[in-house]
Amino acid sequence: MDVSPVVTEDAAPLPVASAHQARPDVWAQQQFLGARLGHCARTKRLVAYAQALANQPGKAMPELLATKYEIEATYELLKRPEATPDAIQAVHRRWVRAEMRTPGRYLLFEDTTYISFSHRRVIKGLGPIGKAEEWQQGFLLHSILVARAPLFSRPDATGRRPGLEVVGLADQQSLIRVPRPEGEPRKDSTQRLYRERESRRWIDSGQRVGRAPGDDSIRWVRVADREADIYEYLISCQELGHGFLVRMSQDRVALDPCNGRRLGSVFEHAAAAEPAGGLYLDLRARPGMAARRARLLISFGSVRVRARWRPGKSVATAKPVDCWFVRVWEPEPPPGIEPLEWNLYADQPVESLADALGVAMDYGSRFLIEEFHKGLKTGLNAESLQLETSHRLMAAIAVMSVVALRLLDLKELGRRHPEAAASGSGLDAEEREILGVAVERDLDTVAEVLLAVGRLGGHMNRRRDGMPGWITLWRGMTKLRLLVEGARLAREIASRKPHT
């Protein structure tokens, strides 16, 4: 069987400079100026805080800001009741949602992460996380990250996904987990069914983003991991005009579309489909696991999914979900290696191998939101904040979340248009000139610019190393900003010296 990826030619879009890579002062005004915080001075302070974070990501507050007054004013801003995450991100989200209403195909990556402050003494307003031990405290951060995708997603020669254009956050919820009622057994699932379900955030996020435009040139696709395999979530997507691409978790009942009879479970139904083709996927080395090339097979088909039982509702009267499935699996993994396997629900027809490959690539792009979480926690050190209340912590992390997009976007630039002119990298002419001098080479393409930035961050630029990762790029960009500021100060000093 041929397992080579299906690839067809089409015209690549012209590269455009990324809005996320603008100079920090310009970028901060674009993303936050206009936020309604009750007084214009607070909005200016918000812009200044965001600019400082963009200039020196990962630094603690006393290192970010130059004077005691600026530090205290920023603490005061974060304490204000008006400084909610929704208010802080309002300008950014409006811009993102406006972009989502222009023609194109948009992947809405959705996921929840725990923001943990378990290493701290008890912080007012936080709730239990993890296994809800007494010492575990924090909150849930549920985000919808939007990226503009090609009209047809296809793997490259190594089986990897295409590059995406990071748009931004369409929505973000900061949620405090409600403790289990005293006396209720930890594993009493019956009681949980009748309480407000924590999974409600998945349905609420769609309502907050709103209905998709009724325009055939615009498509929104919600992409989520197994936690979103919720009947109400799939139905909500259909009602709002959102596409969906969700990894299966629940082994639901598959029904015959003609007579409604039970066909077995959805996993059995997917496993019974014959492979239509496949692809090879190059996997990078990981701790305890060598790099390897995986041979994957793909099958697909339609499926009618029976509704789940809910308290007070009959399964027979609930609407089933008509959709398509795509199964991607590794038939012959190396000895001792767990085989790769994805079982996916998709809302749109999957009627060919090319369609199935496109679904697989879209789901593979979901890793972008995991990179976002990593950038927020590791790049910006969100969990190291030394603020004393949940309100201040959530306000600060709302700002950091938008800053983290700059980090995320850097890496995607190299995927989208590596051979495009260097001007498409998002760096201005002065930054590219200083970067070229710093690494002692000419920079003609986007890939060469990113390799040079990576070199500043410690990447060796050897052929076998591949492109630099986001942490290395982030370090390099931080160093480049310092070099540019140093050049500006040198010009200012030179202009003040008397001419002889």
Image (tube, rainbow, N blue to C red):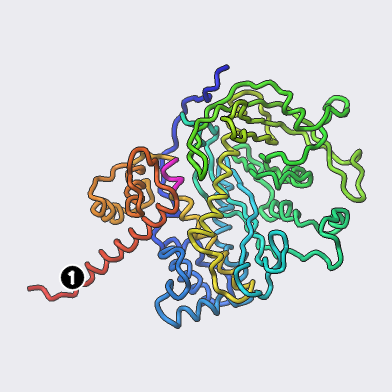
**For the view shown, which residue lies furthest in the front direction?**
336
Task: Using the rendered view, name the quadrant where residue 421 is placed.
Answer: top left
Q: Which residues are magenta?
A: 411-415
Q: If the image is split into quadrants, where does the N terminus sit?
A: top right
Q: Amino acid at mark 1?
A: Ala
Question: Looking at the image, is 59 positioned above or below residue 66?
Answer: above
Instruction: Tell me the residue at 57%/66% (across/down).
Output: 88
**For the view shown, which residue lies furthest in the top direction?**
1
Q: Identify which residue, 382 or 66, lies in the foreground.
A: 382
- Using residue 163 as the reference point, say whether residue 210 is left or right of it: right
- Using residue 190 as the reference point, say whether residue 39 is left or right of it: left
Neighbourhood count class around disc 1 (C-alpha, 10 Å): few under 14, some 14–19, many 20 upward: few
Instruction: Tell me the residue at 65%/54% (across/down).
Output: 112
Q: Where residue 354 sits in the image (x, y, percent)?
A: 58, 25
Residue 55 is covered by the magenta coloring: no
Q: Where residue 350 sits in the image (x, y, percent)?
A: 66, 28
Q: If the image is split into quadrants, where does the C terminus sit?
A: bottom left
Instruction: Tell me the residue at 47%/61% (across/down).
Output: 30
Q: Main secondary structure of the magenta part?
A: helix
Residue assigned mark 1: 494
Question: Looking at the image, is 490 positioned above or below residue 414?
Answer: below
Res. 333 in view: yes
Q: Where residue 58 sits in the image (x, y, percent)?
A: 46, 64
